Image (tube, rainbow, N blue to C red):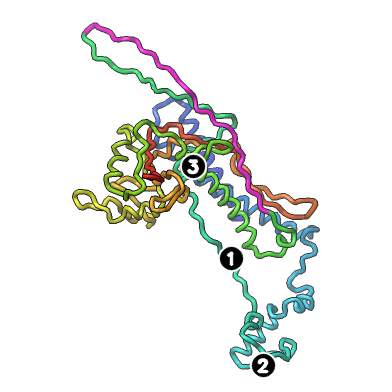
Amino acid sequence: MEKRLQEIFADLEALQVRKTAIETELRSGGEVDLVALDKEVDEINGKITPLTEERRRIENKLEIAKKINSGSPEFRNVPKPEENKEARNMENMFGTIEYRNAFRGFVLNNTPIPQEYRANANTLTTDIGDLIPENVMNTIIEKLEATGMILPLITRTSYKGGVTIPTSNLKPSATWVGEGATSDKQKKTLGEAIVFAYHKLRCAVSNSLEVEAMALSAFESKFIENVVEAMVKATEQSIMSGTGIGQPKGILTETPATGQALTIAAADDLTYQALIEAEAALPLEYENGAVYVMTKKTFMAYMGMVDSNKQPIARVTSGINGKPERTLMGRTVVLNNYMGSFATTVAEDTIFAALFNFKDYVLNTNYSMTIKKYEDNETDDLVTKAIMLVDGKVVDKNSLVTLTKLLTI
């Protein structure tokens, strides 16, 4: 475990050195490939986060092991496996090594189980659970949730202060002139600015001291996973549909540019023409990078639909890594569970699909997600919590085209 920790430190140091070198290259003022460097920085940040989390988990386990070995008071009353054998047998005799061996001899050699493990009672089918030795696998099965589809796609910043991004709709125009002639002098102005505030996201889970000392080792790691997953899910939910009040403002709550908010009547079905209209509404200058975003149920409704040449408009192919890659009319589709589906009955007008370039959404984390553990002195409960300060907004909504299913005809 300590060897792995040293490897993580070495990897983090190498990534940080490369990141610093990129920043130096950007500040040098020389000719650089901004797109390639930006992509490399995103890849480095994507590697740093899981390494940092793994480092924290290992450090936490090493700290617990150190406390146990040093006889720390919080672990002093936990009996070792070879101690208090009699008490252990009284509490759960059917989970002991002795009974397991006796049970094995009974199964393999028909050797009678010793009297101390038997009682004068008739065995019923409801008692079988007590007679079979208890063997618990070191894992916890939980219902899966789909998260982590949106965060890798957006633009991430980490500024300490409030972020202000100025906007401008006025661009200069070039004029053809004759020999010796000149053109009008034009001005370039900045209009409104997009300002990022601070919204606090917090998740805390508590467990008793007894659970911390005696539960399965898988329990602690699952605790951390649940907290992190809850934070990711809340962040992605706000990115898609946040109100902007006490939380980031979502993509689907933005008002699209004129002509880019399309609707489908409640009685209508999904059609190829609706996609044609959505593609037509997307400005040509925002063509590159825009993707479809919808639920899996909505995407599957397009499967089997063909264009005028009888070519399927929805395709699912296997990528290089074997993962399914979905496209609509050749454009990438990003699936999520944070919006409504076309086929689902709803109580209001619902955006069931959209076109958007996720790079046009900026998420600023003033205080990155930090996981802490502390003890409640009144109850001795141990609390695991995660906190982050974050805000996000669409900085350029011209790549946003929405498809809304109307509640009424």
Q: Amino acid at mark 3?
A: Ser
- The disc placed on residue 166 is none
- The residue to which callout 1 is attached is 139
Q: Indicate the position of residue 302 as horizontal and vertical percent values.
A: 32, 52
For the N terminus, the image quarter is bottom right
Q: Amino acid at mark 1?
A: Thr
Looking at the image, which residue is at 56% across and 38% down?
A: 247
Q: Is residue 129 visible?
A: yes
Q: Is residue 98 magenta?
A: no
For the C terminus, the image quarter is top left
- The residue to which callout 2 is attached is 112
Q: CA gap, disc 2 to disc 3?
A: 66 Å
The mark that comes first in sequence, 3 or 1, is 1
Compare residues 352 and 396 and report the one nearer the observer.
352
User: Is there CB contact under 8 Å for labels 2 and 1?
Assistant: no
Which residues, given as a range, are shown in magenta? 179-205
Circle 3: is it few (<14), some (14-19), or many (20+) Cα within 10 Å? some
- What SS does tag 2 mark? loop
The mark that comes first in sequence, 2 or 3, is 2
Looking at the image, which residue is at 45% across and 20% down?
A: 191
- Closer to the camera: disc 2 or disc 3? 3
Q: Indicate the position of residue 246 as horizontal and vertical percent values.
A: 59, 37
The mark that comes first in sequence, 2 or 1, is 2
- The disc placed on residue 241 is 3
